């Protein structure tokens, strides 16, 4: 009898560990930055499926509108640094020699091949040791298609992995006569992402737009204010009037090194005092800069600086690291 009880308790603990149905905003989270983009071309469905299998807590979607108002999952408003648009639609560039997502219909975008990120001027692959450029058969896709993949995998694997969409360049979209935010909020709502409990974190660099999302559009989603420039870190009190967290560049957390040990700015503690979570970008095992190893980067920022999660191209490494904490 005793051994059956022990077995049942073990099974229960095992399944709780596997299913992760509870909201996880209160633990350190791993955000798969453009998917498992350290291993497969960024923002492809393949990179998203891999991130899901690696047990990232959230998977990121950068969003830009097509000509026919479909939110496309792609990092930039441009196509020419991750696709073969220059060979397939040679005459569709603008005067600045760039090819814009917004100038193409969803059907046209679907004809493009997606590849590992490269410099459009030199053709050189951005991260030389990643998935080889121009290999494989990858396509662009919509936000709806990605949500269906993630929700489908959540069902078939009994996981509850969240989404972390970003509204890209709302001002550019507005000048083009389009309301990206409104379209994205509608898609999110249609798929059940409406409140802070719904495993969806909405992010934006444009502070006016994120404030508008909370105050005018009355969104109840978990909102993260992305921070690009150091001077923006002085606006935390204002950010706290509408956002639930901040997404700074990780270097904004680091201060000088004393006796070979990193010290920190007050950004994380200031944010925490205002009730804001801190999710810095971007943890890359193949781009370490001031750190001597990825282990050191994770220990320094996730543990010593006490951040609440991070954007990473290598979700498996951060998931593994946090498992041991
Ligand atoms: O969105 C946060 C993180 O993704 C950093 O920004 O430029 O990679 O979209 P970016
Ligand atoms: Ca992003």
Image (cartoon, rainbow, N blue to C red):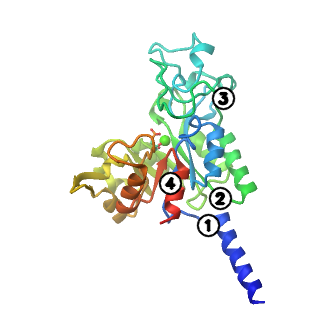
In primary-sequence order, the first of circles 2 and 3 is 3
| Observer-nearest of 46 and 164 | 46
Residue pictured at 62% horizontal, 31% vertical: 69
Location of mark 4 (residue): 318
Location of mark 1 (residue): 22
In primary-sequence order, the first of circles 4 and 1 is 1
Label 4 and label 2: CA atoms lie apart by 18 Å
Label 1 and label 2: CA atoms lie apart by 8 Å
Label 3 and label 1: CA atoms lie apart by 37 Å
Please tell me in which quadrant of the rendered image residue 135 appears: top right
In primary-sequence order, the first of circles 4 and 2 is 2
| Tag 4 near tag 2, CB within 8 Å | no
Specify few, some or many for label 1: CA neighbours under 10 Å numbering under 14, 14-19, or 20 or more. Answer: few
Per the rendering, the mark at residue 160 is: 2
In primary-sequence order, the first of circles 4 and 3 is 3
Q: Which tag is nearer the camera, tag 4 or tag 1?
A: 4
Label 4 and label 3: CA atoms lie apart by 26 Å
| Tag 1 near tag 2, CB within 8 Å | yes
Per the rendering, the mark at residue 46 is: none
Label 4 and label 1: CA atoms lie apart by 20 Å
Say if disc 4 is inside 8 Å of ligand 1: no
Direction from residue 6 to residue 246 in the image, left or right? left
Q: What element carries label 1?
A: loop
Q: Position of residue 128 (x, y in %)?
A: 48, 30
Q: What element carries label 3?
A: loop
Location of mark 3 (residue): 136
Q: Position of residue 84 (x, y in %)?
A: 59, 20
In the rendered view, tell whether residue 158 sits above or below residue 125: below
In primary-sequence order, the first of circles 3 and 1 is 1
Q: Is mark 4 on a helix, strand or loop?
A: helix
Q: Where is residue 251 in the image (x, y as percent from the top left)?
A: 33, 47
Q: What element carries label 2?
A: loop
């Amino acid at each position: 009898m005793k051994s059956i009880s022990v077995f049942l308790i073990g099974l229960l603990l095992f399944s709780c560990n596997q299913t992760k149905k509870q909201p996880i905003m209160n633990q350190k989270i791993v955000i798969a930055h453009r998917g498992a983009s350290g291993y497969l071309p960024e923002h492809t469905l393949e990179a998203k499926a891999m991130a899901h299998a690696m047990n990232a807590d959230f998977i990121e979607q950068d969003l830009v509108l097509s000509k026919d108002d479909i939110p496309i999952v792609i990092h930039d408003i441009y196509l020419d640094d991750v696709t073969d648009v220059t060979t397939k639609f040679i005459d569709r560039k603008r005067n600045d020699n760039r090819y814009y997502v917004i100038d193409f219909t969803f059907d046209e975008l679907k004809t493009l091949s997606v590849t590992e990120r490269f410099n459009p001027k030199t053709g050189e692959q951005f991260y030389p040791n990643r998935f080889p450029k121009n290999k494989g058969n990858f396509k662009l896709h919509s936000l709806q298609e990605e949500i269906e993949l993630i929700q489908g995998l959540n069902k078939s694997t009994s996981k509850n992995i969240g989404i972390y969409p970003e509204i890209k360049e709302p001002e550019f979209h507005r000048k083009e006569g389009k309301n990206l935010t409104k379209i994205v909020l509608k898609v999110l709502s249609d798929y059940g992402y409406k409140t802070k409990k719904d495993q969806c974190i909405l992010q934006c660099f444009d502070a006016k737009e994120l404030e508008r999302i909370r105050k005018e559009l009355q969104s109840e989603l978990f909102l993260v204010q992305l921070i690009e420039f150091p001077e923006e870190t002085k606006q935390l009190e204002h950010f706290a009037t509408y956002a639930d967290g901040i997404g700074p560049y990780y270097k904004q957390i680091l201060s000088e090194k004393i006796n070979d040990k990193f010290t920190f700015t007050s950004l994380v503690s200031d944010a925490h005092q205002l009730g804001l979570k801190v999710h810095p970008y971007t943890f890359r095992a193949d781009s370490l800069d001031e750190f001597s190893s990825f282990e050191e980067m994770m220990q320094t920022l996730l543990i010593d600086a006490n951040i609440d999660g991070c954007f990473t191209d290598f979700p498996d490494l951060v998931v593994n690291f946090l498992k041991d904490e």
